[in-house]
Image: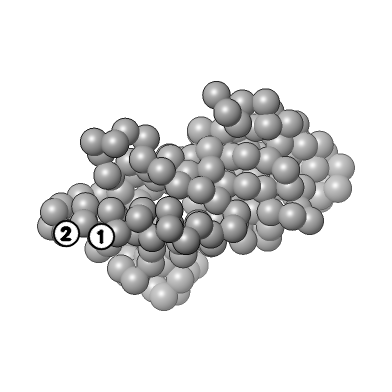
Amino acid sequence: MSKQSSLLLRKQLAELNKNPVDGFSAGLVDDDNIFKWEVVVIGPQDTPFEGGFFKAILTFPRDYPLRPPKMKFITEIWHPNVAKNGDVCISILHEPGEDKYGYEKPEERWLPIHTVETIMISVISMLADPNSDSPANVDAAKEWREDPTGVFRKKVARCVRKSQETAFD
């Protein structure tokens, strides 16, 4: 399977390089490893994240696309759906099938038709519209619900500034 996975990932990377998608860029961390990508998510306009450059690592399983990649921000980001260690928690990246908690429908979870592009578009829309019902960062979710234009926005603004300073490291 890993040969097919690597061919599919090469194809997706070539496609993204040929036809870049607004809002993010993608490349390999190491040219010899197609299973580990670095992506940079550009903070969406008209959101508290606007102007930010948030680096993340996508790690693909050897049986991709049967199973989803893991995504972890390496740039600090304050968001209800990103754990404090940077792990991204959204339905599309959850293992396929039934949700044992009954929270997500199977069609909201990972499906083999998803691509890096559909993952990244989901992540960008997650930044614009957090889901505070199922938070990975409970503190950020609470602030987003109770004081979205105060404390929450201040913490995000700090992350945006920091991301701009380290964007080209």
Whether residue 1 appears in this view of the structure is yes
Q: Describe residue 38's horizontal placement relative to residue 77 as left or right.
A: left
Q: Residue at x 30, y 68 (%)?
A: 112
Q: Residue at x 69, y 54 (%)?
A: 44
The chosen color scheme is one colour
Q: Secondary structure at mark 1?
A: helix
Q: Secondary structure at mark 2?
A: helix
* Vertical side of 58 occupied by 145: above or below: below
Res 125 quadrant in image:
bottom right
Q: Residue at x 53, y 43 (%)?
A: 40
Pointer 1 local density, CA inside 10 Å: few below 14, some 14–19, many at least 20 = some
State the image coordinates of residue 4 (x, y, percent, origin top left).
Answer: 16, 59
Tags 2 and 1 touching, CB below 8 Å = yes
Q: Describe residue 42's horizontal placement relative to residue 27 as left or right.
A: right
State the image coordinates of residue 132 (x, y, percent, origin top left).
Answer: 65, 56
Q: Residue at x 43, y 58 (%)?
A: 18
| Residue receiving disc 1 | 8
Pointer 2 local density, CA inside 10 Å: few below 14, some 14–19, many at least 20 = few
Circle 1: residue type: Leu
State the image coordinates of residue 137 (x, y, percent, origin top left).
Answer: 60, 43
Circle 2: residue type: Gln
Whether residue 101 appears in this view of the structure is no
| Residue receiving disc 2 | 4
In the image, 143 versus 76, the foreground residue is 76
Q: CA distance from mark 2 to mark 1?
A: 6 Å
Can you say which quadrant of the picture contains the N terminus? Answer: bottom left
Residue 138 bears which disc, if any?
Answer: none
Res 82 quadrant in image:
top right
